Amino acid sequence: MYNSVLLLLLVCASSALTETENADWSMGTLPPRPASAWNATWTDRLKRDLLANYDKFARPAQHTNTTTLKLSISIRHIIVDDLETTMTVQGWMRMIWNDDKLKWNDSDYGGLELLHVANHEIWQPDVVLYNSATANILDNYGEFNCLVYPNGEVLWVPLAELKVFCDMDFTLWPFDTQTCNLTLGSWTYDGDKINLVLLEHHADMQLVITNNEWEITEAVGYRKLKTYACCPEPYPEIQYKITVRRRSPAYSAVVITPTTVIVLMTLASFWLPPTAGEKIILNACTAMIICIFLLYFAQKLPAMANHTPFVVLFYSSSLYMVCTATIVSVVVMNLARNRHATPLPWIMKKLLTGWVGHILGLGHLIVQATPLHHNMITGQAEELREHQTSVLEDHDNIGNSCDDRQMINPRSRATSQYEWILLAAVIDRITFLVYCFLFAVLAIAYAV
């Protein structure tokens, strides 16, 4: 009996103490003593009051009201992948919306005007990247806390990595400029439920980390309303148009400068003597250099069906021209080296030794191809032949005729040979002029 009365007194005393603490809390003096050993703060009390029955999967507004989401992006770094034709934008997303279920009177909580909550504790708009290159990852944002204000405004600034496909045009590579679009929007809510608004029309680039290969020239945001065939409600989108320009000084030294060398080596082969076998070696070296660069382009650039880079077209055209130059060199060497028993037709010879040969700068070969030049050179041979004829009077007429052929035929054959060498040199010079014109046309057509 005594024990029962004592237990009843203890219960009554505990109840009276609890009522006194609750009265003090309601007056705003002290928070109630927590059940645990640690001391509760105003933040703990506020979070318990706000999130006790909070459903983070329900939009924090009446179904007849619209949640306005303000959005902007700050770009930190960009990565452009030429082979995959993708652009990765790394930066900070800034989202602001109003949550009607997260409002409080700061005077009731010790003047608390800011509450930090984890992003998984409250409702968040399902804004995703529509044209994402990583379709298996719908959440492009990191796990970062949200800031909540007494009026229900929520600020969320997560780190974001947005990777999108781009329709790249490599026609002017390596002096190209690429444009990619980031299209952001709600995945399940239409414009009547979530209205997207741009905070800033230009992306913030104050904290951009310099890219060694690309330079951001423009990052502009637009708001668009899109209606799908399935649904009459409009779906707002935020689209950022990002334009980047390739930094090309390094490519100019590696890719563009060798084109000059290739052109000069190809043209130099036509200035070698017609009988020089080094013409074939020089053309072979030039063709090998071009093939090496074409292999480099195949590894550096994607296979483009409609936008083949001009520099690749120039190298491939140069390879065709070098192969043709090799064939011309073979023909020229064949004309110059073979022993021709018959001279050139007199019409062709007259043309080559006339104004055509002089215009092409072949005066030294024209002199060698004239009979007068060989008569002067072989004057001593003529005197020696006459002396031998007078001394050898006992030879018969057949023998004398044979001696005459032996002394006259070499002279005529030498003259004929120089005429064919002159023809080979004319072909070289004319081909040189044609190639100069073709390279000029290629340079103009593929100029960037």
Image (cartoon, helix red, strand yellow):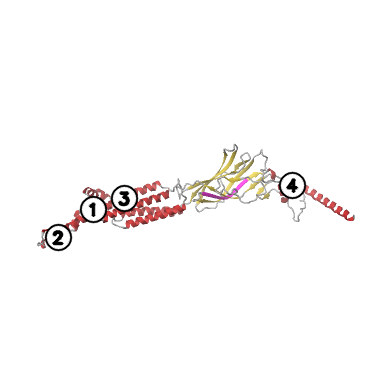
Disc 4 packing (10 Å; few <14; some 14–19; many ≥20): some
Of label 1 and label 4, which has the lower sequence position?
Answer: 4
Of label 3 and label 2, which has the lower sequence position?
Answer: 2
Of label 4 and label 2, which has the lower sequence position?
Answer: 4
Q: Residue 374 in the image: x percent, y percent?
A: 20, 56
Horizontal side, residue 437 vs residue 345: left or right: right
Horizontal side, residue 230 vs residue 319: left or right: right
Distance in Å between CA atoms under marks 3 and 4: 95 Å
Locate residue 402: give its quadrant: bottom left
Of label 1 and label 2, which has the lower sequence position?
Answer: 2
Element under disc 1:
helix
Q: Residue 228 in the image: x percent, y percent?
A: 57, 39
Q: Nearer the viewer, residue 103 or 396?
A: 396
Q: Which residue is mark 3?
A: 431
Q: Which residue is mark 2?
A: 385
Query: Which amino acid, mark 1?
Result: Glu
Q: Residue 251 in the image: x percent, y percent?
A: 45, 53
For the residues carrying marks 4 and 2, which lies nearer the camera in this image? Answer: 2
For the residues carrying marks 1 and 4, which lies nearer the camera in this image? Answer: 1
